[in-house]
Image (cartoon, rainbow, N blue to C red):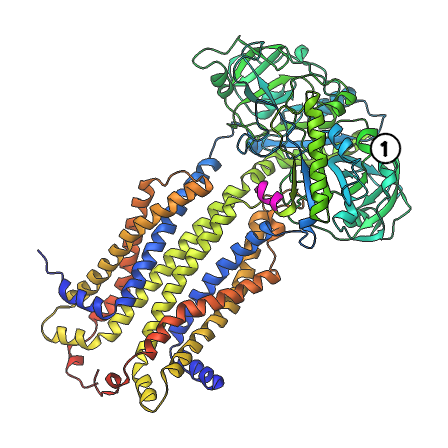
Amino acid sequence: MIGYHLRLALESLRRTPGLTLLMLCAIAVGISTCIVTLTVYEGTSTDPIRWKSGRLYAVTIDSWDPNEAANPKRPNLPPTQLAYKDVKYLLTSDVPTRKAAMFRTQDIISGGGAADAQPVPITTRVTSADFFPMFDVPFLYGTGWSAQLDQGAEPVIVISRELNEKLFGGINSVGRTLRWNNRDFRINGVLNTWFPLPKFYDLNRGAFDALEDAYVPFGWAEALGRFPNGGRVACWRNDPIGSFQQFLQSDCVWLQMWVQLNDAASRRRMQAYLDAYWADQHQSGRFGRPRNNRLTDVRQWLIDQEVVDNDNRMLVGVAFAFLAICLLNTVGMLLAKFLKSAPGVGIRRALGATRGQIFWQYLCEAALLGAAGAALGLLLGALGLQGVHALYARGSIGPGGYQELTHVRWASVLWALMLALVATLGAGFYPAWRLARLPPASYLKSDQ
Amino acid sequence: MMDLNLGPIFSSFMRNRTGALLVVFQVAIALAVLANSAWIVRQRVETLNKPTGLDEADIFVVSTAAFNEHFKYEASVQEDLAYLRTLPGVVAAAPTDAAPFSQTGFSTDVWTNPTQTGAPQELNAFSMDEQGLQALGGHLRAGRQFRADEIKPPLAQRSSDFVPEVLITQAAADVLYPGKNALGNTVFDSAGQPAAIVGIIDNLMGSLPRGLRTAYQVALFPRLPEARSLIYLVRTEPGRRDQLLAAAEAHLAHSNPDRVIKYARPLEQFRRRLQLADSNMEIFLTTAAALVLITTCLGISGLVMFNVNTRTRQIGTRRALGARRRDILRYFMVENGLLTTAGLLLGCVLAFGVGAWLTRQYGVPKLNPFYLLGSVPILGVVGQLAAWIPARRATLVPPSVATRAQ
């Protein structure tokens, strides 16, 4: 029966090619704008590590100015980063399964591959050994470093796949030596392609910032003896900071810290650990703001830090409003088209077709349109995403940024299918129902 | 008064209520999208068109980084500046610590008293030498520029020495000394150290145009930047930027083996990156508005065409009974006009509803009624045009169809 329905539907669509094309375009354009905006929106709101995002927590303490919140627009949130002395203490906790502190720096690397190679400016993440297993970072060659190496200033380095290709042409460079900031470092590992979007663990430079080129143990935060210069340093005290040691002891916040807590019990214990530390420091005169120690899981973190841009939300709204107009349009055209075929329906009904059969017949026709519209819409959507990519790429400097989100993904195909269903039901349901309910007799007369 | 045939129009509405309602809803949604899009685009255009106060078309930025202990900072800066400033076609070159528009840079709180009484004002500061203002393409409004002998050496690490003199923009002067002449007055840093305001400059955008309450609260400090944030700002004669950028990059890459060039790029790149979100939003919303308008037209044309087709015989009958062509045309135009008007009225309510929601949810400024009133005639006229094309076909129906058997 379904084959018969489809054959008749195709036949009927062929009879009015102009109208069919018009409806097809309306559905396709409506669906494609939705696909474009949803793909970008979904890219910004996606959970980059969904298999364990509920077990990963950003650690924050409200260490800010007693008289002013760190973010006056959202006074209930503590600063997004921590001071060095707090991190040093919190890293000694044995409650979390994994724990990592980190920050971003700008550095110079030299001595890779060719002897006359020019020094290259790169970015580095100074972080703990747990960074790699905690975030499930994939390795192409070698591994990260062991946790003992975080303590001192161990000259081991992990480099990104891209940097390995640039310096060594992509060969296994583990064991080779690189000069990082004028010191010899042994390459311990080369990462495989890895690009978590949003870059949830450090949102200072935007959620779609490029990843760092290299990673070195956290001990270098202190051993390097210089002020960090690639991330964000925020200070609220007016006290002058003369030396690097003073800086490390200051209340300036510049470090991100993440922990992995596998169950509710360890989460409670970690919270208690934070609260105990806060109380202790509060006693001794620090932490003048109300207690606000937070363990924020990845999803909540992305919400708190407002990673999804309001512009994206508004554009999704506009796209759906447009789809609604397109569907209203299609309903009108389908209704006109179906009602024209009322005499034929009258004959079928008189010959014994049930209302249900008529209804399904015409819903089939709408579904056919919806499916074709979705296919065309997906194609147009892919083109649209290319256009959006070009628009974002024209203003970007280097990799990273919104253009990374403008690729057709499986989610886009899924959206197209779902929207096709919505289009079919939304546009076809009423006209088909209306036609099925027509009294056949009135259309059997020779003259309307 | 002209007879608009309202009776038959209403009775035909009642026969095809759905088709009529569909058009009403389409027009309503279209108006809500159109008015609010236009309003949001207007905000973005305003942001995009803000004057920068800089000669941004003729400036390029070179960032360098030392990578070994042989590097002599001050000697290197002297050598680089000597080269850049004598390059034919260069108007001015200055070392500084952040590129305008780059969203990385320094800001500092200042007070008008040494005891930090009252709320501080945040200034976006550039550390520069005596050619800094020329290199930015800024203009001195009052007072004087820095002298070469006033330029302080870079701060040792994060020492808290303030500078003895500052240049500030008019916007900064206005918030620090409202209603007074800031020139010759003093500002104090968080440690109570004073700096004399030796000059007021025309408003220009700093390195943190998004971070501060206004983009124009900028100060110039007479000091060499810290070695690790050193960049050169080079302003050229009009049209020579790209050529000189390439020449400078090639020279500086080899003139000193102890440092590397991190990048050399036109200042406009930073501005484009800063404006990207707004300029893209402008493009997206304009495209959406155009699509909405086109689709609504198609919907209106479609309905009128349907009506014309189903009423061919009635039209013929009316023509046979003496109706003129323009009576037929008028009938369809009036019919569509009524529907569009109903849609526009409903759309006004919807547009304000959506606008209020956008204000509450996303902080979009309250929809200006003027933008709504401006969109109404656009949609109305375009809607009538869309109806006119099929309606004209109706006038071509000959009276004889009425007498023919179907």
Q: Dividing the picture into quarters, in which one does residue A251 lie?
A: top right
Furthest residue in direction bottom, as rendered: A351
Nearer the observer, B38 or A248: A248
Quadrant (top left/top right/bottom left/bottom right) for the C terminus of chain A: bottom left
Q: Is residue B287 above or below residue A445?
A: above
Q: Looking at the picture, how far across and down is residue A387, in whole percent?
A: 55, 54
Q: Please state the chain letter of the residue tagged with numbered disc 1 in the rendered image.
A: A
Count of numbered circles in the view: 1
Q: Looking at the picture, how far across and down is residue A59, in whole percent?
A: 69, 38
Q: Is residue A179 above or below residue A264?
A: above
Q: Dividing the picture into quarters, in which one does residue A68 lie?
A: top right
Q: Would residue B265 be seen by someone viewing this image from the given angle?
A: yes
Asked if residue A247 lies left or right of residue A290, the reply is: right
Q: Is residue A360 above or below residue A233?
A: below
Furthest residue in direction top, as rendered: B184
Q: Residue at x 51, y 30 (%)?
A: B52
Q: Residue at x 85, y 49 (%)?
A: A143
Q: Residue at x 78, y 31 (%)?
A: A88
Element carrying mark 1: loop
Q: Residues within 10 Å of mark 1 (few under 14, many from 20)?
A: some
Report the residue marked by disc 1.
Answer: A182
Q: Is residue B204 above or below residue B18?
A: above
The three-letter code of the residue at mark 1 reads: Asn
Q: Residue at x 82, y 25 (%)?
A: B71
Q: Residues in magenta? A: A300-306
Q: Would residue B230 be seen by someone viewing this image from the given angle?
A: no
> Is A8 one of the magenta-colored residues?
no
Q: Looking at the picture, how far across and down is residue B404, in whole percent?
A: 17, 84
Asked if residue B400 lies left or right of residue A176, the reply is: left
Nearer the observer, B98 or A135: A135
Identify the main secondary structure in magenta: helix
Nearer the observer, B43 or A207: A207
